[in-house]
């Protein structure tokens, strides 16, 4: 299963994407599904807050996943490499994901 580990090792993004590709815009017959798995136990179901920034630009998007790490659909407004700054239940991590046209 294609996945990306956070730089600090606190979270893993498991990509439910065809050929490891997330799409922007999203495909009409597929979602940009990501399963977030926290390697750190958490007790409160606080949301997972994602601040995504397009590498080499100033475009930023903030998305919240209710209940914390778990299944999500993360659609972003432009193709390219995005840096995800993640925070949940007092924990943080960062990773990069690529979206293709």
Image (cartoon, rainbow, N blue to C red):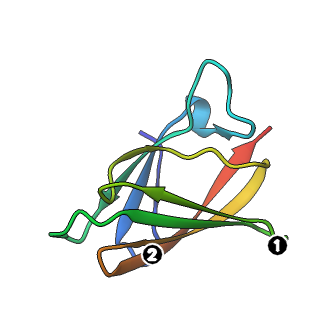
Q: Tell me the residue that label 1 is attached to.
A: 58
* Disc 2, SS: strand
Which residue: 68% across, 49% down? 76
Quadrant holding the C terminus: top right
Q: Quadrant of residue 1?
A: top left
Residue 74 sits above or below residue 9 on the image = above
- Pointer 1 with pointer 2, Cβ within 8 A: no
Residue 7 position, x and y percent, is: 48, 74
Residue 37 position, x and y percent, is: 32, 56
Which residue: 84% across, 71% down? 56
Q: Tell me the residue that label 2 is attached to.
A: 93
Hey, which residue is sitting farthest right in the picture?
A: 57
Side (left or right) of 55 relative to 13 = right
How packed mark 1 is, by other alpha carbons closer than 10 Å (few <14, some 14-19, many 20 or more), is few
Hey, which residue is sitting farthest left in the picture?
A: 43
How packed mark 2 is, by other alpha carbons closer than 10 Å (few <14, some 14-19, many 20 or more), is some
Residue 33 sits above or below residue 80 on the image = above
Side (left or right) of 99 relative to 57 = left
Which residue: 32% across, 50% down? 70
Residue 58 position, x and y percent, is: 82, 72
Which residue: 54% across, 34% down? 17
């Amino acid at each position: 299963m294609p996945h990306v580990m956070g730089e600090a090792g606190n979270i893993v993004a498991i990509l439910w994407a065809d050929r490891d590709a997330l799409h922007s815009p999203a495909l009409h017959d597929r979602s940009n599904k990501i399963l977030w798995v926290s390697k750190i136990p958490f007790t409160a179901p606080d949301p997972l807050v994602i601040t995504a920034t397009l590498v080499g630009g100033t475009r930023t998007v903030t998305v919240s996943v209710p209940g914390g790490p778990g299944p999500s659909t993360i659609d972003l407004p432009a193709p390219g490499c995005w840096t995800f700054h993640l925070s949940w239940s007092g924990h943080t991590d960062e990773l990069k994901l690529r979206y293709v046209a």
